[in-house]
Structures are given as structure tokens and as C-alpha cells.
Amino acid sequence: MPPPPVPSPRITDLKTARALFAGLRDATVETVAVAYLDPNRRLLGMRHVVGGRDQVAIPIRTVAVDALAFGAYGVIIAHNHPSGDATPSARDVAFTRALAVGLRTLEVVLIDHLVIAGDEVTSLRAMGIV
């Protein structure tokens, strides 16, 4: 008889989100990761997109299609800044706002957008942007 399935991790706070996205910390090119969560904030799946030295793009449409495919209730997005500065750029802020609006029309919540640079993590939710 196979062992019982291990439940997916619950992403309930900034600490668990940091752990989920810890792999972005040391990336030498900008990389975005999107976590899709159920109503109990259990991880349903993820998508990673690798960009260039100082920029990465993921279409809102891609995040929305994945959210619908997973039947996600919420999304947490994170990307790294290889420069070492975790300050969100104007593009980061604009994208976050547009993504939140787009997902909201699908009844999916943008829970947070994290900018990771080394050991620094900036939460756009904590900044009041999400």
C-alpha cells in the first residue's frame, strides 16, 4: 500500500512565503515565481520565469490562466533583484496594481508581491500597494 500523500505546505505569513521563494535569493538574473494557493493557502502549484540581467516579465494573462487552471483562490508572486536592492521599481508597482485588478475580476486574490534581494525581502502588501 502506498504511503498517504504529504499535504502541500500552507503559506500563511511572510516567513513561510520567504521560505517558499528562498531559491530566488541567489539567482544572478531576474526570475519571477508565482505560487497558486487554495482557500486554506495550501500550495497548488508554481510557475517560474527566468528573465535577463535586470528585467523579467510575465504577462498578466499567463498568471490568470494558471490561476484558473489550478482553481486557485489566491496568488503570491515574487521576483528577485540581483542588484541587491529590494526596493520595488515603478514597473514593479504598476505591474502589481494591474495584476491585482486583473485577478480580482476572476475572483482570485493577489495576496502579496515580494521583491527579494539577498537576505532582504520587501512586501508590496506591507507597503500598502496590494
Image (spheres, helix red, strand yellow):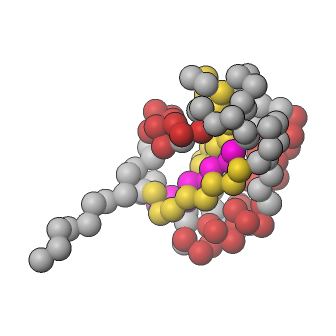
- Quadrant in which residue 60 is drawn: bottom right
Question: Which secondary structure type mostly characterizes the magenta part of the structure?
Answer: strand
- Quadrant in which residue 90 is drawn: top right
**Near-viewer residue (76 or 20):** 20
Quarter of the figure with the C terminus: top right
State the image coordinates of residue 103 (x, y, percent, origin top left).
Answer: 71, 61
Image point (66%, 27%), residue name = 117
Task: Give, as a single range, the part of the protein colored magenta.
Answer: 31-39
State the image coordinates of residue 27 (x, y, percent, origin top left).
Answer: 64, 36
Q: How many marks?
A: 0
**Near-viewer residue (23 or 19):** 23
For residue 123, say whether it is visible: no
Image point (72%, 30%), residue name = 82
Residue 120, compared with residue 16, is above or below; it is: above
**Near-viewer residue (19 or 25):** 25
State the image coordinates of residue 108 (x, y, percent, origin top left).
Answer: 63, 62
**Near-viewer residue (117 or 122):** 117
Image point (71%, 50%), residue name = 50
Q: Is residue 72 magenta?
A: no
Quarter of the figure with the N terminus: bottom left
For residue 48, say whether it is visible: yes
Q: Is residue 33 magenta?
A: yes
Image point (70%, 22%), residue name = 84
